[in-house]
Amino acid sequence: NMWWADYAADAASQLAEFIHQASLPPNERKENVAISDAVWSLRRSLPLSSNSKDDLIECSNEYWAVYTSSAKQAVLAFRGGDGGVEDAKHHLGSPASAFLRDEDEEKIPASLPLDIVRQLGQSYALTICGYSQGGISALGCALAVRAEAWLSQCVLMNCATVFWTPWFKQLLPEEDWWTNPPDFTSKITSWVVRDDFLSEGSPGKARAPQVPGTTVVLPTCATGSDIMKNHEFINFYDVPL
């Protein structure tokens, strides 16, 4: 499958390992992940400031994980939703989160980890990635710091844009980013599977909203009427070549 082979050959495909680790319970994540020639270490906390080594900020939790390498690179990876009640209420990508928490759906959530993002940016070149509902969180973080040189890239996998959140309008640029995209959009790549109803669209029906940057549409993985297969993370983690 040529298009899936292109994805597998792209460095972005290696980020699926970090999203996989983020999808595990925090105590089951690998302390070290070897990718290509680099070893990445799980970071559970970071110094609150460059001048303090005692005051720490938690940088990994049940919704995301941070890994860093000795080459001064960092990855912040967001997992998708698990379909449970707690995720519906607390996952930043959940379309019901603001309602269930009685919050303003147009206000950027206080739990969006921008403090972690900016702290990582003080010491590392940062890549932000996310799958499904986690793509909503990843894109929100990337948009918030889009002008920063230390933001290397934002990579999304089947980002659930059908749940396009109203608070995005607080972060999206005022420029015409469709016909005259700002420079920062070159850092955003969204990989979606054809006919994934959460990220690309339903067969023969409306397409899902697309994010700023480049969207790459990969061939469908579904057979027959089992269109849910198109959304599964395993497509990105165990590539269907």
Image: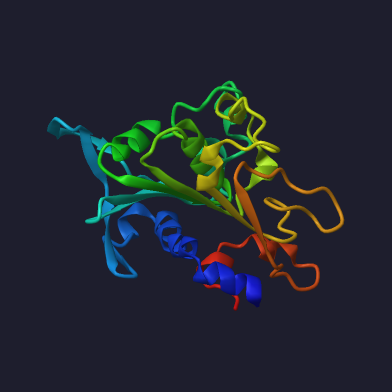
Residue visible at 71% across and 67% down in the picture: 220
Residue visible at 57% across and 46% down in the picture: 133
Give how far across and how far down residue 104 sits, in percent: 59, 21
For residue 136, above or below residue 219: above
Tell me, yes or no, if residue 91 can be seen here: no
Residue visible at 69% across and 50% down in the picture: 198
Query: Can you say which quadrant of the picture contains the C terminus?
Result: bottom right
Instruction: Left or right? Give the position of 35 relative to 170.
Output: left
Residue placed most toward the observer, 150 or 25? 150
Instruction: Left or right? Give the position of 83 relative to 38.
Output: right
Give how far across and how far down residue 2 sits, in percent: 64, 75
Query: Can you say which quadrant of the picture contains the N terminus?
Result: bottom right
Residue visible at 47% across and 50% down in the picture: 129
Q: Specify the quadrant of the image occupied by residue 23.
A: bottom left
For residue 123, above or below residue 79: above
Q: How is the image coloured?
A: rainbow
Residue that extends furthest to the right in the rendered view of this protein: 204
Give how far across and how far down residue 90 sits, in percent: 50, 37
